[in-house]
Amino acid sequence: MTIDKTDIATVPRVRSRELSILTFCQFLYYSGLAVDLTLTAIVGMHLASTLALATVPLSIMGGVSLVSSFFAGTLSAKLGHRTILLAGALAATIGALVSMWAVLIHNFALLCLGTAIVGLYKATGGYFRYLAADRAPEGGRTRALSIVLTGGVAGAVVGPWAATLSADLLGAQYAGSYLLVAFLAVAVVGLILFVHPKTRTAQGETEQQEPVRIRDAATTPNFRRALVLLGSASGLMTLLMAMGPIASSSHGHSSADTALIIQWHMVGMFAPSLFSGKLVSRWGSAPTAAVGTGLLLAGAAWGAMDSSALGYAIGLGLVGVGWNFLYVAGSDFTIRTYPAGRGGRVQGAIEASAGSITVLGSLTSAGIFNALGWTGTNLVAVVLCATLLGWLLLVVRPALTREEAA
């Protein structure tokens, strides 16, 4: 195959343009997700017959996302990430409109259906970063996925603010917020169409290669490290975040305070992406993950001691920063388990496994909160963080040292 020099010269520009598109799509994705994180537990509380069911819609979203994550990875290996991202955004449009209708007619079961459909979209959200990593030059894959995550910074600021601003647009409180989610998802559909269907390199468009088998990747230490770090990051964060809005309300904070708390939590989640990729390259994945675990522990400890609105913002903000460090480090271990462009199955397995822990955190958060209160919930997180930190320092770090010396 003959490659025109002009085509070769356009490759860096294509990469840069596509990285910008994927970053903006990640912004739109997390802006919509922020609406669900800010409001769904509260809306569930208003529509459900009992407080114990308040987080069920959020848990259903996580459950559907869990099951769909594996199939999204498997299908992306056959159809490409672009197709899966398009399908996810279309599902979000439909699910958000169903949730809007549920609020308008005050129907809890319909809200659960709407959030379940949006769960299909949630299952695809991580693939923006994987697509960016696959199309990055060798040596820049971790940095590329970290850059895409910076889209969440603007999403963290815009999402909760837009959720409250649009809440009363349709008469019934919060119906307009779900209409906003549909609008943001439609915008993702339009943008993804500008992403080239195939990876372009200086050698031309890459051919479809056989994806790495899950059983082959699962035998590697990096696969297991990715599972633990991504699962722990999402599970610990969800344990605290899922009940954050309700706990904040129970302490007498206003809805504006609650939106601000979630806003700062999400800023903490994504603002470090501006430099966390560089930290992984400089320090290594395990030390970065250890720092992230320490920050998560500090956030939970702060939350246990201070129930003021400021205390919530600081505690959940630190939890968000810790999540980012763990998430980027876990993602780095993930992309080490396969060559670029061949990780669809592996990505699906890891995303689904991590998602199962997220669902567990969501399902148990209400029960733990009812039994132990906000202070007790944070103390549970402190114990879990201490366990993870011990594993990183006493097991992973020595193993990596031995591998580097071999």
Image (cartoon, rainbow, N blue to C red):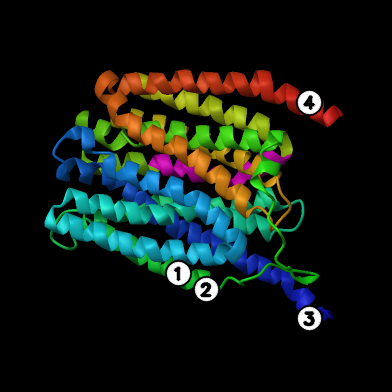
**What is the C-alpha distance between the residues marked 4 and 3?**
45 Å
User: Does residue 34 sit above or below 287 in this rendering?
Assistant: below
Q: Position of residue 171 (x, y in %)?
A: 13, 60
Between tags 3 and 2, which lies in front?
2
Q: What range of the chain is rendered magenta?
A: 264-281
State the residue position of label 2. 193
Examine the rendering and report whether any part of residue 166 can be seen: no
Q: Earlier in the sequence, mark 4 or mark 2?
A: 2
Q: Amino acid at mark 4?
A: Thr
Say which residue label 4 marks. 401
Distance of label 3 from label 2 (alpha carbons): 23 Å
Q: Is residue 35 left or right of residue 318?
A: left
Residue at 83 percent across and 79 percent down: it is 1
Q: Earlier in the sequence, mark 3 or mark 2?
A: 3
Q: Report the residue marked by disc 3.
A: 6
Name the secondary structure under disc 1: helix
Check if residue 181 falls in the magenta segment. Answer: no
Q: Residues within 10 Å of mark 3 (few under 14, many from 20)?
A: few
Amino acid found under the numbered disc labelled 2: Leu
**Is 393 rendered above or below residue 6?**
above
